[in-house]
């Protein structure tokens, strides 16, 4: 990508935004990009283990997992940023109220 000039004479490199289906192995190699994805707040869906020493685990806790079928495949990578969108996604999951599992009453 080429630099672009602005009125004050300074330059910047435009941000490239792509909407794609993420592949974990490709995201691991692409350290120049930031992968933004929606995530549930439990961050435990899937079977892939996230390194407990990673910055992600230090922020959200150990024992977290990543799935293989959603954009959250990049969960736990240093170049991935989650946007929390819902609580536990399964009915009757862990007793936590959510859009699909509302609090009693």
Image (cartoon, rainbow, N blue to C red):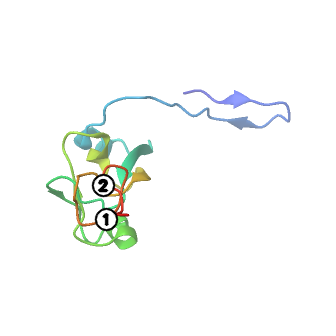
Q: Position of residue 70 (x, y in %)?
A: 26, 40
User: In the rendered image, which quarter contains the N terminus?
Assistant: top right
Counting every numbered tag in the picture gives 2
The answer to which image quadrant residue 97 occupies is bottom left
Judge by depth and name the residue closer to the eye, 8 or 100.
100
Q: What residue is rendered at 33% in x and 54% in y?
A: 77
**What number is the disc on residue 101?**
2
Residue for point 78% across, 37% down: 10
Element at label 2: loop
Which disc, if any, is residue 9? none
Q: Which residue is mark 1?
A: 96
Q: Quadrant of residue 64?
A: bottom left
Q: Secondary structure at mark 1?
A: loop
Image position of 49 with respect to 1: above or below: below
Tell whether 8 sits left or right of 60.
right
Nearer the observer, 85 or 13: 85
Give the spatial CA distance, label 2 vs label 1.
7 Å
Residue drawn at (40%, 70%) of the image? 59
Work out whether residue 74 or residue 100 is closer to the camera in this orientation and state it: 100
- Dot 1, how many residues are within 10 Å of its Cα: few (below 14), some (14-19), or many (20+)? some
Quarter of the image where the C terminus is located:
bottom left
Where is residue 48 drawn, in percent x and y? Answer: 16, 55
For residue 84, above or below residue 63: above
In the rendered structure, are the residues bearing label 2 and label 1 in contact, judged by CB atoms less than 8 Å apart?
A: yes
Q: Position of residue 20 (x, y in %)?
A: 36, 29
Q: Residue 80 at x, y = what percent? A: 39, 50
Q: Residues within 10 Å of mark 2 (few under 14, many from 20)?
A: some
Determine whether, in the image, residue 60 is placed left or right of residue 92.
right
Q: Earlier in the sequence, mark 2 or mark 1?
A: 1
56 to 86, vertically: above or below: below
Among all residues in the image, which is located at the extreme right? 8
Judged from this view, the residue extending furthest toward the left is 47
């Amino acid at each position: 990508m080429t630099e672009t000039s602005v009125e004050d004479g300074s330059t910047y490199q435009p941000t490239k935004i792509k909407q794609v289906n993420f592949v974990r192995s490709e995201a691991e190699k692409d350290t120049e990009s930031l992968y933004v994805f929606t995530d549930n707040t439990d961050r435990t869906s899937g079977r892939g283990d996230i390194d407990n020493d990673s910055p992600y685990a230090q922020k959200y806790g150990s024992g977290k997992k990543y799935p293989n079928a959603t954009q959250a495949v990049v969960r736990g990578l240093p170049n991935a940023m989650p946007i929390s969108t819902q609580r536990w996604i399964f009915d009757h999951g862990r007793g936590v109220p959510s859009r699909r599992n509302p609090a009693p009453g």
